[in-house]
Image (spheres, grey):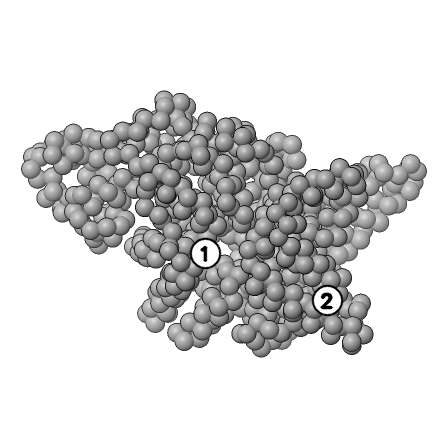
Amino acid sequence: MALLRSLRTQRTTTYLIYSRTSVNVSSSSSAAVAAIRRSLHTTTALEVDVQANSQSSSNQELQHGQAANILRRRQQQHHHHLLSRLIGTPVGVGVGGGSRQHARYVHSGQNGRQSHQLVQPEVIVGETMRDKRQLGKSASPKPTGTPQRDPLDVSFNDPIAAFKSKTTWELVRAYMVYMICSSEKLVEHNMTLMKWSKQILGTRLFTMLMKATFYGHFVAGEDQIKIIPTLERLRSFGVKPILDYSVEEDISQEEAEKREVESSVSSAGDNKEEGAMPQYHVDKSFADRRYKVSSARTYFYLNEATCERNMETFIKCLEAVSGATFGTGITAIKLTALGRPQLLLQLSEVIMRTRQYMEDLMGGQGNVLTHHKTIKDLEKYYATLGDNKNVQDFLKNVTSDKEGILHLFPWSGIVDEDSQLSDTFRVPDPQTGQMRRLISQIPPKEEEMFRNMIRRLNTIVKTAAELDVRIMIDAEQTYFQPAISRITLEMMRKYNKDKAIVFNTYQCYLRESFREVGTDLEQAKRQNFYFGAKLVRGAYMEQERARAQALGYPDPVNPTYEATTDMYHKTLSECLRRIKLMKDCGDDARKIGIMVASHNEDTVRFAIEQMNQIGISPEDKVICFGQLLGMCDYITFPLGQAGYSAYKYIPYGPVEEVLPYLSRRAQENKGVLKKIKKEKRLLMAEIRRRLLRGQLFYKPKGNYVPI
């Protein structure tokens, strides 16, 4: 216990330094508070770990010695790592934190909220500066010189570049995992086999088996502490993390359908009014949103308390990313984890009905701002109605600028204030002037649920800004996506004022992807905020096609794989074209940030060729690349080692609770046998090379610095 008390007195010094947040007397107090949030969370985890180690021994003296050794080794590792990076290395502080002079409370408990009162920020700033100066006096300065960079083989056929970050055992394990993924029967029944294995072997042996195979290959570790070695090694080879706590519920199809139907229909009933669109209403046949989906996680709403816990989990991911990656990390989140899906369905229908209203009124297609109409144009359309008070009140709330109308509704008020959805989404009937609802009446309790969803998202993004971590909001099914994109764009407008904190995700297998990205780029330009986008091919294609056919609405998916590739390249080219225009005009090109999230090496090559053609260099930091941990290492690592901004999507969580994630990874790899074939070939080539050269016990040691 004396050791634990000693540890508590060190938490400010050790972990404020570990956070590597550059805080000085003139820094905002929110940065200091964010650093304390991380220190409390990490220190608590270490204390629990020390206590667990202490309780495992019967000899009290041995307990203390073991705990002390564990703590000492970790502190030495932290200090050795930090001193090599800290001195003379300024790090920017996230925007949007604001100034807080009062004490704050944070929550990082494992089972609900655990509050810790913080000392005044001014005291923390002083202690941090003193500690940093003392470390600076005793530490050797960081070696100067240019970071290590390797030439890039754009054919991605270099096994050394692909696997120099791996031990030989890790290469053998990867080859074994891919061999299993090549067996269709094993993959088809993988979840059943894993459950049987657990029953036969018992929890302990099963855990050891999984860590030696699938879990060890696809998952970084069990918690925020155990993933740090993986993150450090990735960083030393030029690769940065996108962190995701990958615990998933393993519920039956019957339970999934029951939850989805109950949470997708208002307590007032599913009233399909005139003009209702069938795709934005739940259908029991497709209520299990996992149907034909292997590459994306699915959240099923249970209650508001579960959404609060999901928010807490996302915040812990932010803290883990910030503490281990020093401002270069990203956390991925899903909006369906934060609220009732019914609200996203209703909001999506409102957005699409608004577009239909504008098309009927003015002609044309697409988002409201693409019509380039002004309020005066609207007044002309309503001229036959005379001096109608309803119309005048409606026009006052239209969002516009000197170039025309952006939105018919005050979206900023919807995400910032307590606007009532039922009262907001009403438009004048062009014939009668009476106000017509575009959304069915929402009961007060469900209005409150929507406010809760927005509050949770605001809390997450605000925390990300304070911790200097970026947020990527994942794309989901098309019947949710209009609402998700609209809310995400408003979060960009609110938080992406000085740099890109919030990123939206665009699925290029959709026919409307190019138009949607163009529209959102236009809004970012006109409202002067930083635009962040992750481009993916998409995860829900088979489900979307089947649902469209069953419910009788147009198929939203591109007809062929080649059409999807063309859409991806066309959308990426448009983003790059706009970045070049900004560079040529002397504007900040970083106002547009794009992640090429693809396992397709042709798409990665296309992006690199386009960057070279229009003069965008990796140092511009406007284009980055991302792949999943354990997949396509032959793409990610050569990119990172050549100086490109490269990311790995890093899942973590307890072994037993990430089994659904591992099952999906196996299913996904079964569908990309061509990529597996290449990865297996490169793995075998590197294993053979090491055996012939006597490098069987090769230890990875990188000297790369992520851009």
Where's residue 376, x and y in %?
13, 46
Give the residue type at disc 2.
Pro
Q: Residues within 10 Å of mark 2 (few under 14, many from 20)?
A: some
Q: Name the mark nearer the viewer: 1 or 2.
A: 1
With 459 as the anchor, is 525 left or right in this view?
left
| Residue sitting at x 54%, y 53% | 330
| Residue sitting at x 78%, y 77% | 693
Residue 432 sits in which quadrant?
top left
| Residue sitting at x 59%, y 34% | 251
Where's residue 557, x and y in %?
38, 51
Mark 2 lies on residue: 700
Residue 200 sits in which quadrant?
top right
1 or 2: tag closer to the N-terminus: 1
Where's residue 570, x and y in %?
37, 64
Mark 1 lies on residue: 537
Residue 202, compared with residue 674, is above or below; it is above
Query: Nearest the camera: 707 or 127?
Result: 707
Query: Circle 1 sits in a helix, a strand or a loop, which is it?
Result: loop
Residue 142, compared with residue 106, is above or below; it is below
Q: Residues within 10 Å of mark 1 (few under 14, many from 20)?
A: many
| Residue sitting at x 36%, y 49% | 556
